[in-house]
Every structure is written in C-alpha cells, then in structure tokens.
Image (tube, rainbow, N blue to C red):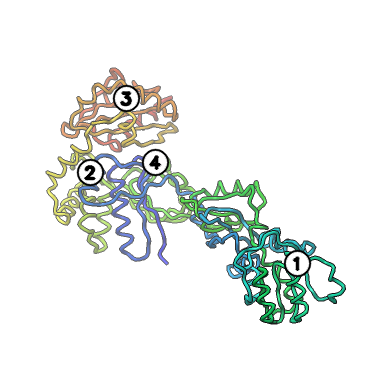
Amino acid sequence: MKETVYITGHKNPDSDSICAALAYAEYKNGSGNYNAIPVRLGNVSLETKFILEYFGVEEPMLIDTLRLSVVDLDFDKIAPVSSDISLRMGLNIMTKNNVNSLPVVDRDDKLQGIVTVSDIIHNYIDVWDNTILGKSNTPLDNIIETLSASPINIPKVKRTDIGSISIIAMDLDSIKDNSYENDILICGDRREVHEFIINNNAALMIITGNGKLDEDLLQRAIQDNIAVISTPNDTFTTSRLITQSVPIHHTMTTENLVVFTIDDLVDDVKELMSQSRFRSYPVIDLEKRVVGLISRYHLISSVKKKVILVDHNERSQSVDGLEDSEILEIIDHHRVADVFTGNPVYFRNEPVGSTSTIIASIYFENGRRPSKKIAGILAAAIISDTLYLKSPTSTNTDKMMLDRLAKIADMDVESFSTDMFKAGTSLVGRTPEDLLSQDFKTFNIKEEKVGISQVYTMDPESLSDMKDDLFKTMESKAKENGYSLFLLLLTDIFNESSEIIVVGEHKALVAKAFGETLQNNSFNAPGVLSRKKQVVPPLTNMLSNLV
C-alpha cells in the first residue's frame, strides 16, 4: 500500500514554494512508493497563477492544518440503515460488521438516530409488554422476515390499532368470552382454532409448524381483511422471536445526539466525547450523509500525517499542526532554523537561489527527466526566486539548471521572464492588505519577532499614492501580531534596488543598519534584492547589538 505524504511550502507561498512542492510530488509519485500530495498554505500570487496557467498545471490543494481529523482515523465505515428494519436485522448487521451501534437515516438519507446492542437487548427482555408490535407500528413484512414465515393472505388494506399478542393454546370454551379483535394471535395447525380466530376478527393469524389454512377459512380471512402467515418455527420459538420484528425506530436514540464530521479535528472530538457517555457517534461527510461511526477506541492511535517540507524549515512559516505530524524530508535553500523532528530525516539544504534548483538537481542526479510541464514550472520558479539570476543569492548552479530545464520545456526564457514579471507585478485592483500578505514571512531573530513582506514591481512610482495606507496597515498588523519590526520591501526588479518601509520600535536603527537615513518611515536600499541574503543578516546584527 502506498504511503500518503503531503508536500508543502511555506505560508504566504511564493512561486518557488508552490512549484517546488508540485515538482517534488511528481518525483515522489514516480518512484511508486508514495501517494505524494502537493499542498499550499495560502493563496497563489498573480505571478504563480501566471506560471501555472502558462504551463497548464493545477494549483495544489489548499490546507490549513496537518492536525489529525476524523477522516484520518480508521473509524467504522458502516452504512446507515433505514428506520423501518427490524431489531433482528439490525442485530444481524451489527454482528456481521462487528460493531455495537448503527446509524439510522430517514428517506432523505439524513441522520435520524442511532440504535445500539443495548437498545435491542432492553427491548427483547421487556416481555411484559404484549402490545409492543402495535405501539411500534411494526410492518407485517418485518414479522414475516423475522419468523421466516410464508404469507398465506396479505390484506390490501392495512389494519390500524393493532392490539396485543396472544397464543391460542387453551381450550376454546375457556376463552370463548374473550375478545381478540385486531390482535395478533399465534396458533398451531387446528381448524377449530383457525375458525375461532377468524370469528374474533383478529388482525393477524400466525400458524406455527408450517401449518396450512383450509380453503373455506382462507376465503373468509380474505373477505374479513385478516392477515395469515405460516412459520416453520414452533410456538415457543415464534413467541420469542416475534418481538424482534419491532422496527428499530422504536428503540433508537434520537435526542441530544453528538455527531462529528469527517473534517472535525481529533483534539476537538476527544473534548466532546469526554463530555458525553455514548458508546458510538455518527460520522457525516461534508454533504451531511452518514458514512460511519466513531468510538473512543478509534482515538487511541499513533497515526500521524506524513509531510515533506520544501522551501522552508522554520516553524513559524510552516503549516499548523506540524508538531503532530511526521516530517520525512526537508529540502530548502534558507538558513537552518527551528523545525524539530522526532526521527532522523533526509535534510538537503544548499546555498542556491531557489529550492526548485535543488529539486531539479534531484531529478537529474537520479537519472530522471521531469515532464515538460514540470520542467517549465521549475524553470519559472528559478527565474522568480533569483530575479532572473540578478539576485545576489543566485549561483552558477541556478543558471545551469535553468538552461537545462528551459530546453526540456522548450521555452524562450527572456520573453517568458518579461511576461511573468509583468503579470506578477501588476497593481490593478490591489489593496494594502493584499500586497502585504502576497509574499510575507515571519522571522524570529534574537528573541524578536520580525515580519518582512516583499513586493516586486516594474513601476515603483505606481505605489506612491498607496504608501500612507501601506504604513497604517503595517502598524496595525505589527500591533495585532506582536511584531517588534515590520518591513516592506518594494523591489524594483530592473533597477535592482528596493525601497524599504519599516514600522516598529527600532525603525531608525534599521535604516542605519543599511547605511541609510529613515525619512517618512522609509529609505532607499540600492542593490538590495534578496530578503534572505541582504535584509535578514543586517537585521540580525542590529538586533544582536541592542542592549
């Protein structure tokens, strides 16, 4: 059985993060040992959307947590039953499936209740109520099925107000004054008893021992709307079995039900279960259809979701619930940070300009050739993360891989780069909130929480009218999320410089760390293109020197 593993980049994903996850999933699936699922932790940027549409690749699935949910557990995948089936059939289904409960649905397949073995046993031992079949509106089909009976006469018009259950085994003279109208009567193969039952206008005659009904009496039964069936069981067995024909809706629990959906988190399920005393709980899917039952013992599991991290190795940038998952691999080109693993993992970290460069290297080192589409998105991600090899983080390895991938993808790198950057830096309809979240990362530097957003543009002047709103939004986000510093890099791709807007207690020192002076909450940083290599290091030095 293939092992399912999720491959994810960081929060607020950029093109490298998305494309690396997609490409490595293809690589892993090609090995035949994995069911690798590429996922993303946020919306794709305009640039990434352009890349994926250009090469005809679908976006990865969006997730917000790796914490276990109900769908990850091996709960009882038992089909729900109709509320009209007999208790005997319900018990047989439970025995066959080795479960103690059954979910019950109505005609629209919506949850109606739940019936347990205890409910059935309680009904079975309550032998004092001989009117149970009438009270529960038991269908005749249930009685026939439970008794393995053969129908002799099934009236077209259903009787109402069914009375009690009786066995006619006494001398008829001793009971001739009793009224059995609308009752259910069990009898043997005696004509005088059959005639007595018909004369009393009973609702149902049950003949035991495969007994027959004489033709003349059958015609009277048909005329008087009296049901007649014959069972192979003896009278004792029949009397014991008949109450098991009661429909399960009579005994099932319908009030104060606790129901879970397949996407409910296991931690939340445990909390709710601790507050109730049911043995089993119905599970429904996203369309509110019942898919099974979950019990406390299903929660006793060492199952963990398996994950491979690409383009990051810092917990604050990773998926929620990472601590509850099993990390198998980390492939990254950033500094080594604070992701902890319970077991040794495959960790590959190289000082190159793009994680996609490393993914491409893994393909070629193992004699594998990425598909044309995957080669295209890997090349595009390298162009994006190295600013078409202009970033100080770019290396000769990035250039070699870009050239090799471009040939496989049959792409004009120069033309594609221009179109991609134009699409990615378009400011049409953008808001400050949108721009700040597009490519945002959190860094923990010397016990300080620092947020850094980066926006690439081919027309930095177009942002001038928005700067006041950007600054106000940054101050609000910094206060709301507890950032000591919040920086926004407005990076001019072709002039190879950035304007840095900064908020926070030490904002003047930030400008000084770059040899600049802060004016109107911003300063120009010529030659600064890389957040990782040109911004984080001077910030680290500056914060380290604070007393």
For marks 2 and 1, the one nearer the N-term is: 2
Q: Distance between the residues labelled 3 and 1?
A: 81 Å
Q: Where is residue 30 in the image (x, y as percent from the top left)?
A: 30, 63
Residue that numbered label 3 is attached to: 470
Residue at image coords 70%, 63%:
133
- Give the mark toward the camera: 2 or 3: 2
The numbered disc on residue 50 is 2
For marks 2 and 4, the one nearer the N-term is: 2
- Position of 365 with respect to 417 (left or right) is right
Q: How far apart are marks 2 and 1 (CA)?
A: 76 Å
Q: In the rendered image, which quarter contains the C terminus?
A: top left
Residue that numbered label 1 is attached to: 165
125 in relation to 416, above or below:
below
Q: How far apart are marks 3 and 4 (CA)?
A: 22 Å
Q: Distance between the residues labelled 4 and 1?
A: 71 Å
Residue that numbered label 4 is attached to: 317
